[in-house]
Amino acid sequence: MNALNRYIIQPILLGLLVGVIAIIAIPDLRYSFGKQVSHFFRLGTSQNLSYANAVKRAAPAVVNISTQRSVDAPRNPLFDDPWFRRFFNSADVPSQQRMSSALGSGVIINKEGYLLTNLHVIDGAEDIFVTLRDGRLIKAKIIGTDEATDLAVLKIDAEKIDTIVLGDPNTAFIGDIVLAIGNPVNVGQTVTQGIISATGRHGLGLNVYENFIQTDAAINPGNSGGALIDINGRLLGINTAILERKNTKNKDGGSIVGIGFAIPADIAVNVMNDIISSGEAIRGWLGIEAQPLSQNIINSYSAGTINGVLITIAYPDGPADLAGIQPGDILTHINDKPVGNGREAMNLIAQVRPNDKVLLTAIRANKKLQLSAIAAKRPREI
């Protein structure tokens, strides 16, 4: 140990001491050393904070979508003026047609040319055109839409197209860094950065089925249908909406900065696959109708606080009826997940596939019940 200290440790410490003294004493050496240290830390910081690789991986699969449709152009108001019509036979003058265009974004999901966007981006369009990252302009075909989630599936016929890498929204957490890619206000493809502000947002009145990822990455008109990606360039969601507020000084209102919503990628891709294979989104159905619990109902139970929904209808021979659910039961959990005030229940049921086994937890006359149901396909008329 003495030999190690004498021949190795002491020389190293002496060399470090001499080096520090030299750096302090010699200005040129001190400047050069400081510059190298600064460059080292600056280089490391820039590499850690750059998302260029994520953008390079995902951006080629994000496209601009433009639509055209015919709208009635208002005719001159003089044609409807009684005094003017006394001199001119203008009663049958037709309204003129003009073309209206709209812009949005989309994401190419696979090599077959299927892509996802929002229904409100292409709703009512007569012609839809997709502009790829390399500048190619391609006419798109509508494969199908799902109004309940505001999603649309398009298809383009093109060679050498880039596709997005799918991520798993279920492994994304509040505080994770995300990037939004789209074509806001038609300025061209743009990338904005933020974090996941919340997950599982619902009850906003935007869609029938809501399970949004909330983000503060800047989302503006034209971003709809674009991609929300993680720092590895994987798709987490389809950007779909911004929260708006009424502005008394501006009749057009405005967006609340930092509150945007995306449809989770797994939900969007499942809807796409259903539409491609079946022509519609397929959702589970239990054959029940329910309403939130009133305070009087909660007070009538000795168990104290109850979170759930009151079953008002159990359709005869429906999955829940066959499982033993009755009107008046309080449904608290579906597959061990709490149903909350009812919105959660809708989403949980919708995520179940027909013929899946579903565990229902309910309360009847202060007694807990666990029943097993086999989900059916949701009828179109309901």
Image (spheres, helix red, strand yellow):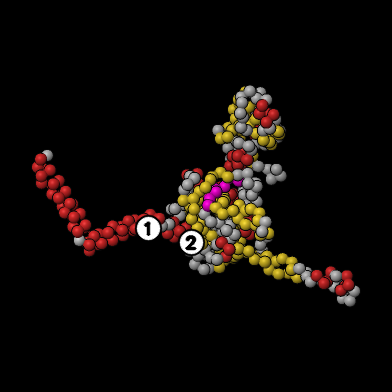
Q: Could you tell me residue 115's position as x and y percent? A: 55, 57
Q: Residue at x 58, y 34 (%)?
A: 338
From the viewer's side, name the closer residue of 299 and 375.
299
The residue that appears at 60% across and 36% down in the rendered structure is 339
Q: Residues within 10 Å of mark 2 (few under 14, many from 20)?
A: some
The reply to whether discs 1 and 2 touch (Cβ–Cβ < 8 Å) is no
User: Dot 1 corresponds to which residue?
Assistant: 46
Toward the bottom, the furthest residue is 87
Q: Which mark is residue 263?
A: none
Is residue 296 visible in this depiction of the protein? yes
Q: Quadrant of the N terminus?
A: top left
Secondary structure beneath dot 2 equals helix
Give the side of residue 10 with respect to residue 363, left or right: left
* Residue nearest the observer in this picture, 61 or 341: 341
> Alpha-carbon distance for marks 1 and 2?
23 Å
- Quarter location, residue 51: bottom left
Tell me which segment is drawn in magenta: 210-216
**Residue 294, x across and y down, in percent:** 68, 32
Residue 145 is inside the magenta segment: no
Q: Residue 64: where, in percent of width, then height?
A: 56, 63
Mark 1 vs mark 2: give the one in front: 1
Looking at the picture, tell me which residue is in the foreground, 257 or 76.
257
Q: Residue furthest right?
A: 86
Q: Where on the picture, by quarter, is residue 291?
A: top right
Res. 318 visible in picture = no
Question: Residue 150 at x, y = what percent?
Answer: 62, 52
Q: Is residue 150 above or below residue 29?
A: above
Residue 60: mark? 2
Disc with the residue nearer the chain's start (1 vs 2): 1
| Residue type at tag 2 | Pro
**What's the residue at 67%, 66% (across, down)?**
100
| Mark 1: secondary structure | helix
